[in-house]
Amino acid sequence: PKEKGWIGSYIYNYQGFWTSPRLIQGVIACQQQFQAQNSDIILVTTPKSGTTWLKALLFSLVNRKKYPIFEQNHPLLVKNPHDLVPFLELKLYVDGQVPDFSSFTPPRIMSTHLPYDSLPKSVQDSRTKLVYLCRNPRDTFISMWHFTNNLRLDYIDTNSIEEMFDHFCKGVSLYGPFWNHVLDYWGKRIEKPKKVIFLMYEEIKEKPTIQLKRLAEFLEFPFSIEEENCGVIDEILRMCSFDNLSNLDVNINGKLSTGEETKMFFRRGEVGDWKHYFTLEMSEKLNHIIKQKFHGSGLNFLYI
Ligand code: A3P
């Protein structure tokens, strides 16, 4: 089925999720060709949930022996996180191209927005670890609305907040329905606890040290006592913070290897910005849907 979509003239439903004609080739190519390794780490996110932040955290956490966090030549100082941790379907396999993995050293860190059942089979069948990140639906929606307005791609022909909100509520958003995506991985964290960790943007904001240690343990890269005492955790969090990353030259004036301006990935980086945009009616409508969809799941979003 095709719908007049919010990020393009049309978006299409493929395997139960919404995707644009521009992305589909990359999705299919990576599903058919990607060969996962047991040591791979794949970040899975709903779009605009803080992917850029988690890419930076994952990269610095996993590579902290190779690239000590205190060093002046740390890759994050000169490269945007999306160039350090590439998307499978949006970068490595984009337009159906054949990627060159020769420069990747294990553990390879990559990312995707694909729902679990649409992941390449080798990812599902291997011991590849999946780090899932989501964010409350109101901030996710507002972030996406700004992002699509900034993209100004020629295939965007609609950007009013009302129209996009209407689509979002119907489940029509890139990689959506939002609730299917989140609930899918929420269930997998119980079914496959060694394979899937479930993180929330708001929880990382609230208790960054606890969440980073949790992530490090899940990935089997736990912090030693010495590292904790030397302030490695604090330094990783500082390096990857919104304030630090968004003020680096590479993220103000740079472009990704895929052409997008790096500054697009940094806007406010806060919990609760939705309050500046949502009407009471919008809050009530989305609340009602979220309550229905997540009923009995035990998952509660944090909005402030
Ligand atoms: P806002 O639009 O609400 O500011 P993604 O990386 O998945 O595209 O998500 C982008 C959102 O994450 C944007 O949210 C962006 O500002 C925020 N973000 C980017 N870097 C961040 C960081 N280091 N810490 C917290 N939030 C960050």
Image: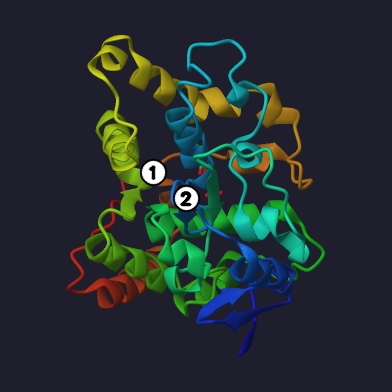
- The disc, 1 or 2, on the residue closer to the chain's N-terminal end is 2
Asked if labels 2 and 1 touch by Cβ distance under 8 angstroms, the answer is: no
Numbered badge on residue 271: 1
Q: Quadrant of residue 33?
A: bottom right
Tell me: residue 177, above or below residue 60.
below
**Residue 104 image offset from top left, x and y in percent:** 62, 39
Q: How is the image coloured?
A: rainbow
Q: Nearer the viewer, residue 213 or 30?
A: 30
C-alpha distance separating marks 1 and 2: 21 Å
The image shows residue 116 at horizontal and vertical percentages of 43, 68
Residue 281 in percent (x, y) is at 39, 70
Q: Secondary structure at mark 1?
A: loop
Q: Is residue 225 above or below residue 20?
A: above
Q: Amino acid at mark 1?
A: Val
Residue farthest bottom in this picture = 1
User: Crowdedness of circle 2 by 10 Å Cα count: few (<14), some, many (20+)?
Assistant: many
The spot of residue 92 in percent (x, y) is 68, 54
Question: To which quarter of the image does residue 225 belong?
Answer: top left
Q: Which residue is mark 2?
A: 43
Which quadrant is home to the N terminus?
bottom right
Residue 204 numbered tag: none
Q: Is residue 99 left or right of residue 230?
A: right
Q: Nearer the viewer, residue 251 or 139?
A: 251
Is the residue marked by circle 1 packed among few (<14), some (14-19), or many (20+) residues within 10 Å? some
Mark 2 residue type? Leu
Query: Left of 184 or right of it: where is 247?
Result: right
Q: Residue at x 58, y 81 (%)?
A: 14
**Which residue is at a point 28% across and 51% down the rendered structure image?**
302
Q: Nearer the viewer, mark 1 or mark 2?
A: 2
SS for dot 2:
strand
Can residue 17 be seen here? The reply is yes
* In the rendered image, the vertical position of residue 191 relative to residue 131, given as above or below: below
